[in-house]
Image (spheres, coloured by chain):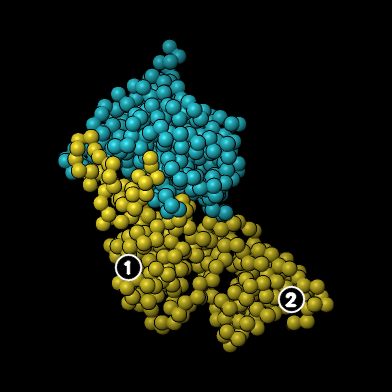
Amino acid sequence: MSAPFETSFARALLDTAQPIPSGITAHNAAIPTGRFAVYRNNVAVSLVNALKSRFPVVEKIVGEEFFAAMARVFVLERPPRTPLLATYGDEFAAFIATFDPARELAYLADVARLEAARTRAYHAADATPFGVAEFAAVDASAVGGIRIDLHPSAEIVRSPHPIVTIWAMNSGERDLAPIENWHGEDALVVRPYLDVDVRLLPPGGAAFLLALAGARPLGEAAAAALADHPEFDLSRNLAGLIGSGLMRSIAVAEPEKNGLL
Amino acid sequence: MAIIANLPARPGVGFKPAHFRDIIAAAQPIGFFEVHAENYMGAGGPPHAQLAALRERYALSVHGVGLSIGSMQPLDRDHLARLKVLCDRYEPESFSEHLAWSSHDGVYFNDLLPLPYTRQTLARVAEHIDEVQTALGREMLLENPSTYVCLTESAIPEVDFLAEVSERTGCGLLLDVNNVFVSAKNHGIEPLSYLESFPLDRVKEIHLGGHDEGVDDAGAPLLIDSHGSPVAKAVWALYAQVVARAGAIPTLIEWDNNVPDWRTLCGEAIAAHDILADASRASAA
């Protein structure tokens, strides 16, 4: 053998137009189409199921049948490159954005991005969030210079669509209702302890957190957030930062280097 | 090889997170839990919190589904390294994998695919198992597969293939009795004749699970190893014959799809317990 055997078998698994590879038979001399189909079916269905369990809200929005058909196209085009199926589907949102039959649902890809971030947060490294008391102990004159290391599970998903509301309504967190005021929403996904939280960020909040994640000091991050949105409210965002368990640690700059606030 | 597989000769259950609260709420009549290795390779979060809690209370079997030992291509070294991290962290009583392949040219198929049994594939599988046992510093158990097709290249009976791999590498065997039943029916042979020459002295764990019944293009029975239903009566009977012959062996109930409530799953484990107890009494008498 048998690398050629494996190669032809592997190719026929994902391409149903391929004939059944040679060298495959059955004891009863039946044409083994139905038998080989068991393998094809196991591969496609198990991978579609992996996507179903990772993207339940996308499935709820489009329905089981549509989701299965869409996921099957993705599976056959982009099968996993790793046995860690928890990471499979990181590219599913980008695929949805180009999937023509879903074009009318312009927000769907962003909802998928939110769901993908939730799984990453679920499996992210554990870290005990930095507490209120430690933050309060920082000298007021040094606050602008501190750098905040965000929790390893934290991700920000920005969208021109109300993805947090859509997600909440379709995951059972909120009742389904028509969305009157259609506007963009930025989501924070974080798992400070065992439960993954999805939070709606206030105006400028995403720019603020992204600047902090980029290792910029608090004062600069606040300025970036204000530039992003004039309604940015620093104290509200700081309270959110602490209250949502979003900080892993802080580093206070040397006093002489710190002239920002 | 440093660490030898030593699960307790009692019933075990494949762990499902949906059962975690029920399992932890009280002592369970379960000798060990088994987890799929690939579900515990993330950095942190609830999977590790649950596994650590289980591990504290019960013996543990780590069962890999993604190493692709039966492939002619090299093992995925990154994956092997992840298995090593997992085994070092949780120190399971057993690590097992399948006589099958699941990856090719970097694509992972998430299914246990068949290989032809030849001198060449036997040498390759033995090399892979040596590599795994060396990397992990522990014995691994190799599981017999469910198969749906015959491969014309095959020249060695599956039982002889498994026996020789075990002899060459020192690995133990995981006898999946449902797989024996499924494969035998799919290939028109009697399950008992498959088991006749099976090296039961090398078997350190048994798997029991449910299967689905279908038919092939010629209308012949085609059973599918689906792990989505109770263990079939005929499989229980076959299992009783195995343990009557071999004595009590750690026995896992696998139920991975349409997962039932904990009480139902536990009921399957209790049924295995009763058969194991009969086997123990018989061998003591």
Callout 1 secondary element: helix
Q: Is residue A185 above or below residue A26?
A: below
Residue at image point 50% right, 65% down: A117
Quadrant in the picture for residue A30:
top left
Say what amino acid the circle numbered 1 marks.
Val
Q: Which chain is cyan?
A: B
Locate residue B35, reporting x and y percent.
Answer: 48, 42
The picture places residue B170, in percent across and down from the top left corner, at 51, 28
Quadrant assignment for the N terminus of chain A: top left
Of label 1 and label 2, which has the lower sequence position?
A: 1
Residue under label 2? A145
Relative height, residue A187 to residue B36 (above, below): below
How far from the left and from the top, in percent, is residue A210?
A: 59, 74
- Mark 2 neighbour density, 10 Å: few (under 14) some (14–19) many (20 or more): many
* Above or below A57: residue A85: above
Residue at the spot 44% in from the left edge and 58% down from the top edge: A88
Query: Which residue type carries mark 2?
Result: Gly
Question: In the image, is B4 to the left or to the right of A174?
Answer: right
Tell me, yes or no, if residue B209 can be seen here. Answer: no
Q: Quadrant of the C terminus of chain A?
A: bottom right
The span from disc 1 to disc 2 (Cα, nearest Å) is: 47 Å
Q: Which residue position is annotated with label 1? A: A62
- Viewed as shown, does residue B204 lie left or right of A9? right
Alpha-carbon neighbours of circle 1 within 10 Å: few (<14), some, or many (≥20)? some
What chain is the yellow one? A
Residue A228 appears at what percent x and percent y?
57, 84
Name the chain under label 1. A
